[in-house]
Every structure is written in C-alpha cells, then in structure tokens.
Image (cartoon, rainbow, N blue to C red):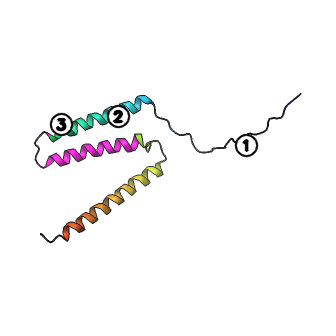
C-alpha cells in the first residue's frame, strides 16, 4: 500500500540567501573590544591633551559605532549595495545635521 505525500501547505519556499548567524564567541569578543574602547575613552578624558581630547573621544566613538553597525546590526554580512546605501544615507544625514547646526550658529545675535 503506497501513500501519497502531499506538500505541506504551511511550508514556505524561500529563495533568499541564508541569514548569517554570528557565533557567541565573536559576539563576546566584539563586546569585550567595545568595553576596552570605552575604557580608553574614560582614560583619555583624564589626560589633558588640550583641544585633542574631543578629537580623541570622537575617534574612539567612531570606531565603536563602526563595530556596532558592522557586527551587531549584521551590516557586514549583507549585500554590498545595502552596505553602500547605509553609508551614503549616514553621510547624507550627517551633512543635514552639520548644515542646520551651521545655519543656527551663523544666525546667532551674539556674534
């Protein structure tokens, strides 16, 4: 007696590439790296470097943001077009922020 196997109506055909799943070890390593960068930021705040304190803190913050975006938001494992879109849109909104800030500064009455 042969039984006919019917296709499951709840199964889905997914032609998209498999999602990348990062390992626990890599997530912990990146988290520890972020903690080290946070410690560097705190340590740099106690060293008098004059106007370079802000530059140092922003540089460290940029590296931390890059790590978070690439690994925790999984942008590293996406298609190159999506990565480019994220970068272009981030730079676009940075320019909007800077333009509005400069417009505010230029129109201050206390100049």
Q: Which secondary structure lies at badge 1?
A: loop
Task: Please tell me in which quadrant of the rendered image residue 103 appears.
Answer: bottom left
Mark 2 packing: few (<14 Cα in 10 Å), some, or many (20+)?
Answer: some
Residue 46 in the image: x percent, y percent?
13, 39
Q: Which secondary structure lies at badge 3?
A: helix
Is 37 on the left-hand or right-hand side of 47?
A: right
Q: CA distance from mark 2 to mark 3?
A: 18 Å
- Give the residues in magenta: 46-71
Kindly identify which numbered label has been placed on residue 43. Answer: 3
**Looking at the image, which residue is at 39% across and 53% down?**
87
Is 92 on the left-hand or right-hand side of 36?
A: right
User: Of marks 2 and 3, which one's residue comes earlier in the chain?
Assistant: 2
Mark 3 packing: few (<14 Cα in 10 Å), some, or many (20+)?
Answer: few
Residue at numbered disc 2: 31
**Of circles 1 and 2, which is in front?**
1
Residue at numbered disc 1: 9
**Looking at the image, which residue is at 41% across and 40% down?**
72
User: Of marks 1 and 2, which one's residue comes earlier in the chain?
Assistant: 1
Kindly identify which numbered label has been placed on residue 50. Answer: none
Residue 82 in the image: x percent, y percent?
47, 51
Q: Which secondary structure lies at badge 2?
A: helix
Is 41 on the left-hand or right-hand side of 14?
A: left
**Looking at the image, which residue is at 15% across and 72% down?**
109
Mark 1 packing: few (<14 Cα in 10 Å), some, or many (20+)?
Answer: few
Q: Quadrant of the N terminus?
A: top right
Is 44 on the left-hand or right-hand side of 2?
A: left
Q: CA distance from mark 1 to mark 3?
A: 59 Å
Task: Please tell me in which quadrant of the rendered image residue 49 appears.
Answer: top left
- Whether pointer 1 and pointer 2 mark residues with C-beta atoms closer than 8 Å, the reply is no
The foreground one among 52 and 24 is 24
**Of circles 1 and 3, which is in front?**
1
């Amino acid at each position: 007696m042969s039984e006919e196997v019917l296709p499951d109506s709840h199964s889905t055909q997914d032609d998209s590439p498999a999602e990348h799943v990062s390992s626990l070890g890599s997530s912990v390593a990146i988290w520890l790296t972020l903690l080290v960068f946070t410690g560097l930021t705190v340590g740099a705040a106690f060293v008098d470097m004059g106007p370079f304190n802000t530059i140092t803190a922003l540089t460290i913050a940029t590296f931390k943001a890059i790590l978070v975006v690439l690994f925790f938001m999984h942008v590293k494992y996406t298609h190159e077009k999506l990565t480019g879109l994220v970068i272009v849109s981030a730079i676009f909104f940075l320019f909007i922020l800077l333009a509005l800030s400069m417009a505010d500064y230029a129109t201050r009455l206390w100049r």
